[in-house]
Amino acid sequence: MLSEETIKLIPLGGLDLTSMNRYSGYEQLLQYRFAASTTLRRIDINQIDITYTYNGSIDADEQIDVRSEIPGIVRSINFTEGSNVSKGQLLVKIDDRELKAQLQQALTLENQAGEIAKRSQKLLDAEAISKEENENLLAEYESLQAQTQLIRVQISKTEVRAPFRGKIGLRNVSVGSYLTPTAVISRLVSINPVKITFSLPEKYMGQVNTSSTIEFTVAGSQTKYTAKVYAVEPSIETNTRSLSLRARAANPNGKLLPGSFAKVRFPLSHIDGAILIPTEAVVPVQKGKQVFITKNGKAKAIDIQSDLRLDSVVLVTEGLKVGDTVLTSGLMAVKEGSPVKVNIKRGNVKGN
């Protein structure tokens, strides 16, 4: 018996057909028996939404392992584990005393070379030295300038800063430890928004666009979230024959954690005036498919066209109309013109 609740047909293969009609009792869904022990069924479904259900994953909007570009001794750690950090915030400071000493030495040599280059130019103007000698002195000065700038860059690298706003994870280093470029200091993730990555079978690629809105849930929660598709992989994965998509969902409370599984429902189409019949009602024939309906008390074979065949239902596009009564069992004993006698009763129905 069907209640006032919305009917949901959930077949295998990931497809989900949700009926938009409601039924009450046996007024619109009737079952019959006739002499050949064949069950009849009349289905009146006007609107359906077809969606594809797939397991996806939640990814951070941005995520990095925080590392230092240069080796050195950790002098200070400037973040709290598990806290939010802003873009450009200082996270770790590495000892820069040796580099600063090198910078002072380089500046001294640079200044000396600069004075020599100025005198060299005056001597060249007075034709006291050759043009080649002057160029060599200028080249040495410029080389020392570059060396000074290189040391300044190295000093700037002793400050490890957050490249984007996000949440910092657990730290793996301590003050006084020797840090190498391969060592992970911590992990920084940006989780508002988050990305939802999932795939669709190749046959549905025509229904994919970057304006689609998906619905998803996560394990341990009944909350339904929405996300908007913003990117589609430009090629099909050859091993799975599927197309990867990525959507973005708001996560202001941080409840959606990167790495979690997401059950994604992707809308394929919305159909008005759809007719769904049980798969057991369809009879394969040489030129296509048929069903038997009752007309004037007799069985009549009807050729049909179906757009979608699932585990339990078939979406019929041609051959049937709303209100037709379809034979769904005992079809081996049915032929064109077989008499059909129907007794309709409330509750359990019995007939000959």
Image (tube, rainbow, N blue to C red):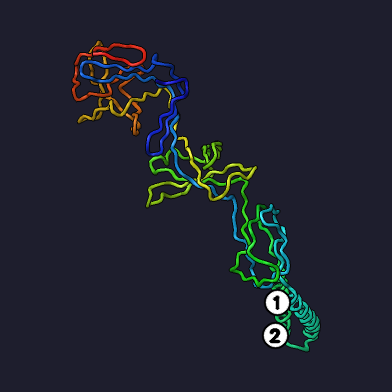
Residue type, label 2: Glu
Residue type, label 1: Gln
> Which residue is nearer to you in this view: 53 or 99?
53
Task: Give yes or no for contact between labels 1 and 2 (Cβ–Cβ under 8 Å).
Answer: no
Where residue 314 appears, x then y in whole percent?
34, 29
> Which residue is nearer to you in this view: 34 or 349?
349
Res 225 quadrant in image = top right
Identify which residue is drawn at 77% across, 87% down.
127
Q: In this view, does 88 lie above or below 275?
A: below
Residue 117 shows in the view = no
Q: Mark 2 points at which residue?
A: 132
Res 7 quadrant in image = top left
Q: Is residue 118 left or right of 165 when viewed as pictured?
A: right
Q: In which quarter of the image is the N terminus?
A: top left
Where residue 164 appears, x then y in whole percent?
66, 54
Q: Is residue 252 left or right of 16 when viewed as pictured?
A: right
Where residue 201 appears, x then y in whole percent?
40, 43
Q: Quadrant of the C terminus?
A: top left
